[in-house]
Image (cartoon, helix red, strand yellow):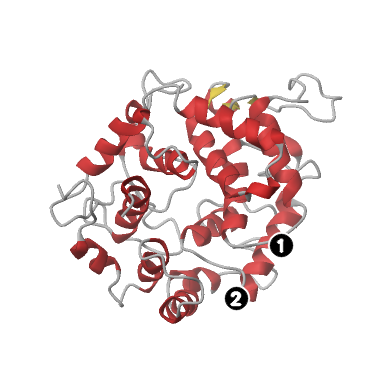
Amino acid sequence: MADNKQPNNDAVRWLLEPQDIGVRYLALRDLLDRQEDDPELISARHLAHTMGPIATILDQMQPEGYWPKPGPGYLPKYRSSVWSITLLAQLGARVTEDERLERACSYMVNQAMADGGQFSINDTPSGTIDCLQGNMCWALLEMKYDNPRLENAFEWMARTVTGEGMAPKSDKKATRRYYAGKCGPRFACGANNNQPCAWGAAKVMLALEKLPQDHRTPLVEHGIQEGVDFLLSTDPAKANWPSGWAAKPSSNWWKFGFPVFYITDILQVVEALVNMGYAKDPRLVNSLDLIRSKQDEQGKWMLEYDYTGKTWVEFGKKKQANKWVTLRALKVLKKVDGW
């Protein structure tokens, strides 16, 4: 394992190799802290949008702004609009770089968001669920998409975490109520046997953290604190959150991968908490040790969970050192160790 407090320079140089356009762009931005107007970053960003994986995904988009069929875009997995937009955001796509991205984001808001702010698998409020809501809210802000309707989406998301002003799912006449999927406060989820779901919580927390400070209402701040308290209610390294009908946590918690859709790993939970300012919290010590234990002597992490053959782009072979996973891990450790 590489040094715990400093990045392995060979690993960073590996991420900066010019042939891997997409990774290089994000390594310059997120590891070397190049400013938005830095000429090298501008060039790398342009290449990522015109020749890298971002370009590959955009080339599959229909002219109206969807993949591969019209509508709210949840199906088919993992190439429809929901998954393509989530992936594009993880690749660093920006609406200012290609007008097709603005078109895709607007299509998603118009087709998949209900009037109450719920992103939905079927464009009705009842089709909402935390992992979808969190992924879409995070992705749209990450891509620098601006739409006043997103305020409703964030309000709904925070309110469902805290329970403020929410009626139970049985009260079908209420203006704001829970549903079969998004069934209760603090991340309760019908897909998790009506128990709180940490997969969904990680997505919601990543999204709430992206919201600028001057847009965070008391409701949002309350939601953030509830989320932190939930994720730290157990040692994240043990992933001992409620696991629905299963007798023990999913083994996927310990498989670091790329991209990350609704299935979540411990690395993403730590990312959410570190982004929220908990990098030095002693409750993360075991999780950080786990992350570091997966680093090899060259400072690299392997791909343990993948979507090979299911997305528009391939991101490496399982059980081999992987640039995308290494980038994910180093981004977290950079914030923790302050290098």
Picture coordinates of residue 295, whole percent (x, y):
21, 48
Q: As rendered, which of 230 and 175 lies closer to the eye?
A: 230
Task: Tell me where residue 12 sits by quadrant.
Answer: bottom left
Amino acid type, residue under disc 1 in the picture: Ser
Q: Residue at x 45, y 74 (%)?
A: 48
User: Quick check: 180 above or below 129?
Assistant: above
Amino acid type, residue under disc 2 in the picture: Asp
User: Quick check: 280 above or below 50?
Assistant: above
Q: As rendered, which of 203 and 8 lies closer to the eye?
A: 8
Q: Secondary structure at mark 2?
A: loop
Q: Is residue 31 visible?
A: yes
User: Position of 112 compared to 288: left or right?
Assistant: right
- What residue did someone put label 1 on? 106
Q: Where, quadrant-wise, is the C terminus in this rendering?
A: bottom left
User: Position of 169 compared to 47: left or right?
Assistant: right
Q: Secondary structure at mark 1?
A: helix
Q: Is residue 74 visible?
A: no
Badge 2 local density, few (<14 within 10 Å), some, or many (20+)? some
Tag on residue 98? 2
